[in-house]
Image (spheres, helix red, strand yellow):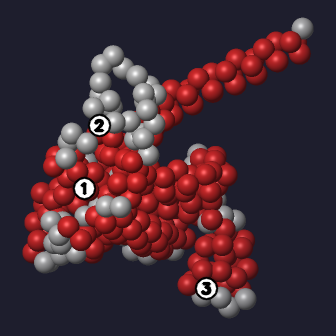
Amino acid sequence: MNNNKALFGKIVLHAAGILVACIALFPLLWMAIAGFKAKTEVLSTPFRFFPERWLVGNYISILQDNMFLKSMIITFGGAVLFAALSLAINASAAYVFARLEFRFKRVLWVYVIMTMFIPGMAILVTSFIVVTKLQMLDTLAVLVLPGVASAGHMFFIRQFYLNIPLALEEAALIDGAGRFKIFTHIFLPMSYPVFVIVGIGSYLGYWNSFVWPTMTVTNVNLFQIMQYLATFRSERGTEMGMLMAGSSLAAVPTIVLFLIFQKYIIRGIKISGLK
């Protein structure tokens, strides 16, 4: 009887998981399939999930658009650079707050944490004024530098570092290793799971950003992919099939990234509850 109950419970859990996955993936699947529809068929009524005729022309046309490809490449390069800088800066700061003792440490940490509770939209105008005075508009730097330091990421990495045994660090200090060597040879090699979470979070934040690039970049050669898609919709709004095709292709790098690192993402979620 107990075995039957356990089996029934597993079946219910798996069925619920499949249902949730189908609901979550439905919009993405519809978007990809809509890329094969004619431009008048995407939003036609009554609703049809599959196209009447499968057309690959939308995907071919969007891939032949140099602006689309350039936007994908520049966004991907900026996202990788942003993630790398985010890891370097936030991991260094997290190590300092986790292991080093210095004056006003608690005050500074409280100050850092307080920034987590300030909505990004609340400082959007002031941030724009700052980058304008620094003459950073229409550069890749204005897209990358302002957001690399993140209190949330510092906090997450710091919590991970607090759980690394102190004995490892003490042994290295006895052997004559300096703080920088301890950080690079002990802490960084052990940080892979948490780095995957922070790196992917930074990557996604950059890839999906729209408001900030729209405010700070007008040079079409630096257009981010979300900017491009928004401009495409405003200028060629009737070509919904091509827009769906472009949106589907824009989601591919993120999906591939998740599939590659899914094991480490799950491990990172498990350690996110560490004190």
Secondary structure, mark 2, is loop
Upstream in the sequence, badge 3 or badge 1? 3
Q: Which of 187 and 217 is in front in this view?
A: 217
Tell us which disc is closer to us: 2 or 1: 2
Which residue type does callout 2 highlight? Lys
Q: Residue at x 39, y 68 (%)?
A: 73
Give the x, y percent position of residue 185.
Answer: 65, 80
Q: Does dot 1 land on a helix, a strand or a loop?
A: helix
Question: Mark 3 and mark 2: span between their CA atoms?
Answer: 59 Å
Answer with left or right where residue 131 lies relative to residue 175: left
Q: Please, what is the three-letter code of the amino acid marked with disc 3?
A: Lys
Q: In which quarter of the image is residue 41?
A: top left
In terms of depth relative to the viewer, which is nearer, 217 or 247? Answer: 247
Q: Can residue 71 be seen in this view?
A: no
Do tag 3 and tag 2 residues touch (Cβ < 8 Å)? no
Q: Name the residue carrying label 1.
A: 227
Provide residue 21's location: percent of width, then percent of height: 57, 31
Three-letter amino acid code at the position of disc 1: Gln
Q: Residue farthest to the top?
A: 1
Q: Label 3's element?
A: helix
Q: Residue 82 carries which label?
A: none
Instruction: Determine whether 209 is above or below 172 in the image.
Output: above
- The label shown at residue 181 is 3
Circle 2 residue: 39
